[in-house]
Amino acid sequence: MKKGLILEGGAMRGMFTAGVMDVLMENGIEFDGAVGVSAGAAFGVNYKSKQIGRVIRYNTRFVRDKRYCGYRVLMKTGNIFSTEFCYNEVPLVHDVFDFETYENNPMEFYVVATDVETGRAVYHKYEGKNDHCFDWIRASASMPLVSKIVEIDGQKLLDGGMSDSIPVKFFEGLGYTKNVVVLTKPKGYIKKKNKAMPIIKMKYKKYPKLVEVMAKRHDEYNKTTAYIEEKEKNNDLLVIRPPSKLQISKVEKNPETLKKVYELGREEAKKRLPDIIAFLNS
């Protein structure tokens, strides 16, 4: 029986996830493995490196920095989150990521990306610094339309949320039978068809399989959340989710808003802590 942590993406909605993770780490809750998608990957790696508070710290510090993120960065670099600043300078210089602890921790950590040529999910067990440094994390979190395609070992990759937003079945397939799922949307949320599909079809016309996957993403997402809710009813997994829609934009520039969403995640985790402990030990 393996215990797993499954982290949905959602850009800056991931601050909710960061709050949840910090409370779990503060209370010594360990998992055999975790899988993160997009922001869930970018923030989730800090669970394996055991860096409590790092996500909220560097985001509030740099979110207003012109080098970090925003449409000015997008126009200049082709990425709404700067590759050089976010994935090199911040984790290697300003708020150092603890690769030593990460690599020595036996907990498995997987990231999900999408192969733009096949439209299929790519599940990668991320090993640390010598595993392409942060490129796998960057690939998982490279949102369509506002990010360049990331190429790793010949594979062309983008945001994992396009192909498997909440990889519950993937983790179950690996033998993780006690899973805690952290979502960034409230219960009852129904994803609708992407209004940007005409733009997506134009931008990615060279990748018809990717366009096909994105056109049906809302259906696949809704099927997954229905599956999760059914398993939740049967106590086959435990879900932590925001009580209502998070009032935060995908590329939020207000550090106070980041803190509010982070604190909401902490509150939900503290509220559910007895349930989490009981579930993982049952």
Image: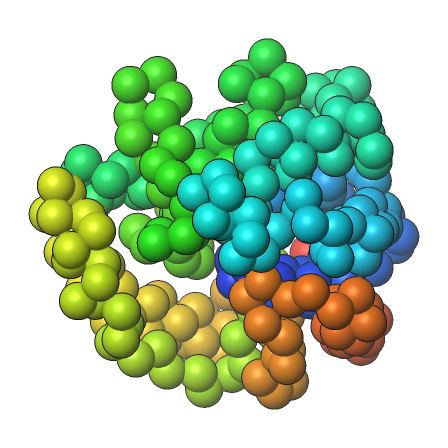
Residue 175 placed where, x, y %?
46, 41
State the residue in front, 259 or 7. Answer: 259
Q: Residue furthest top?
A: 130
Q: Residue at x 61, y 51 (%)?
A: 69
Left or right, 62 with reference to 71: right
Left or right, 226 with reference to 270: left
Picture quadrant of residue 34: top right
Placement of the N terminus among the 4 image quadrants? top right
- Scheme by which the image is coloured: rainbow
Residue 231 placed where, x, y %?
44, 70
Q: Residue at x 62, y 79 (%)?
A: 246
Is any atom of residue 174 visible in this view? no
Q: Residue at x 38, y 22 (%)?
A: 152
Placement of the C terminus among the 4 image quadrants? bottom right
Is any atom of residue 133 visible in this view? yes
State the residue in front, 258 or 108. Answer: 258
Left or right, 118 with reference to 224: left
Depicted 278 relative to depicted 77: above or below = below
Picture quadrant of residue 105: top right
State the residue in front, 233 or 102. Answer: 102
Residue 35 placed where, x, y %?
53, 44
Residue 187 placed where, x, y %?
51, 83
Q: Residue at x 78, y 19 (%)?
A: 100
Depicted 266 relative to depicted 158: above or below = below
